[in-house]
């Protein structure tokens, strides 16, 4: 997954198969690029401004996430090893530059991986932090009404396939790709659980290694940001005819809400 990453290559790691997932997982843990100049993109993206997406979170295992509440991060199931007590993850928030002295760093205390997750579909997880973070949160879509149009993606993953993960937060916009076209590209899409986005014919813009678990979002009817996807997998990064595959958040909104309530309790 994208681990953007992966499976395909579980991104992401993105999307290709078990071997690719393993390889991408290793990539997801790669060192950050140390070039002090802001890079040019997520793949084909641009640097995000400080405070532009204040709910973005970087996770120490090499994944992204978003603040679901001030003490819970929503990320991808393939980014965590299972459910239960977990103090091994460090969440970095509040900055576009990971090296900033203003970065807020908080350890995890517990993880819930999507019930029934087996490496295919249901790619969501929640991470409870040791303390609340005083930053805005990102609402999640609980209806399919926003599963169309143009989306924004952001992350600290590689700005090219096989590249290093980045010091600076990158952003890009990607258009919706319908299930039929995405199924033709991959053959193993799970309609209703996954949503695709990208420039199908020309490629060139996409999430990549290290972006797994990060949000795909757009404006809602009131003009506020709302999360519609979680970076999950894909074939390589920004390749023509292979869009990014994201967890369809609206499908799991109720389950995510219930899981978050159990963590809060």
Image (spheres, grey):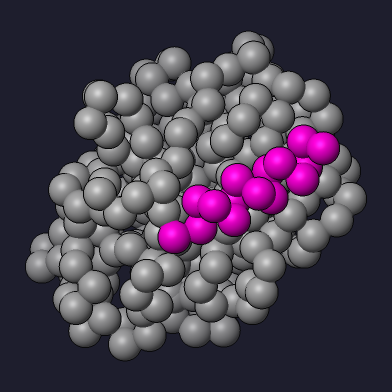
- Identify which residue, 186 or 124, lies in the foreground: 124
In the rendered image, residue 71 lying in the magenta stretch gets the answer: no
Q: Residue at x 49, y 46 (%)?
A: 214
When asked about the image quadrant of residue 233, the answer is bottom left
Q: Which residues are magenta?
A: 251-265
Q: Position of residue 98 (x, y in %)?
A: 58, 27
Q: Residue at x 30, y 54 (%)?
A: 144
User: Looking at the figure, which quarter contains the C terminus?
Assistant: top right
Q: Main secondary structure of the magenta part?
A: helix
Q: Residue at x 35, y 50 (%)?
A: 143
Q: Position of residue 186 (x, y in %)?
A: 31, 82
Q: Residue at x 41, y 47 (%)?
A: 142
Q: Position of residue 7 (x, y in %)?
A: 49, 75
- Identify which residue, 56 or 211, lies in the foreground: 56
In the rendered image, residue 253 lying in the magenta stretch gets the answer: yes
Q: Is residue 131 something that shows in the picture?
A: yes
Q: Is residue 159 rendered to the left or right of residue 196?
A: right
């Amino acid at each position: 997954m994208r681990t953007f990453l992966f499976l395909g290559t579980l991104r992401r790691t993105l999307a290709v198969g078990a071997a690719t997932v393993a390889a991408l997982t290793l990539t997801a843990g790669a060192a950050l690029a140390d070039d002090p100049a802001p890079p040019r993109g997520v793949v084909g993206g641009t640097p995000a401004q400080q405070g532009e997406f204040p709910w973005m979170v970087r996770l120490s295992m090499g994944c992204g996430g978003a603040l679901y509440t001030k003490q819970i991060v929503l990320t991808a199931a393939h980014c965590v090893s299972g459910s239960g007590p977990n103090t091994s993850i460090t969440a970095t928030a509040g900055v576009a530059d990971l090296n900033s002295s203003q970065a807020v760093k908080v350890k995890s205390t517990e993880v819930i991986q999507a019930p029934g997750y087996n490496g295919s579909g249901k790619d969501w997880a929640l991470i409870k932090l040791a303390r609340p973070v005083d930053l805005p949160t990102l609402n999640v879509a609980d209806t399919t009404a926003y599963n169309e149009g143009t989306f924004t993606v952001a992350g600290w993953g590689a700005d090219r396939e096989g590249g290093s993960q980045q010091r600076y937060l990158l952003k890009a916009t990607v258009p919706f790709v319908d299930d039929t076209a995405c199924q033709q590209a991959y053959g193993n899409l799970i309609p209703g659980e996954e949503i695709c986005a990208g420039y199908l014919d020309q490629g060139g813009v996409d999430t990549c290694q290290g972006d797994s678990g990060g949000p795909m979002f757009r404006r809602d009817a009131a003009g506020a940001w709302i999360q519609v996807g979680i970076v999950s997998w894909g074939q390589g990064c920004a390749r023509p005819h292979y869009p990014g595959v994201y967890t369809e958040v609206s499908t799991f909104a109720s389950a995510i809400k219930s899981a978050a309530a159990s963590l809060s309790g």
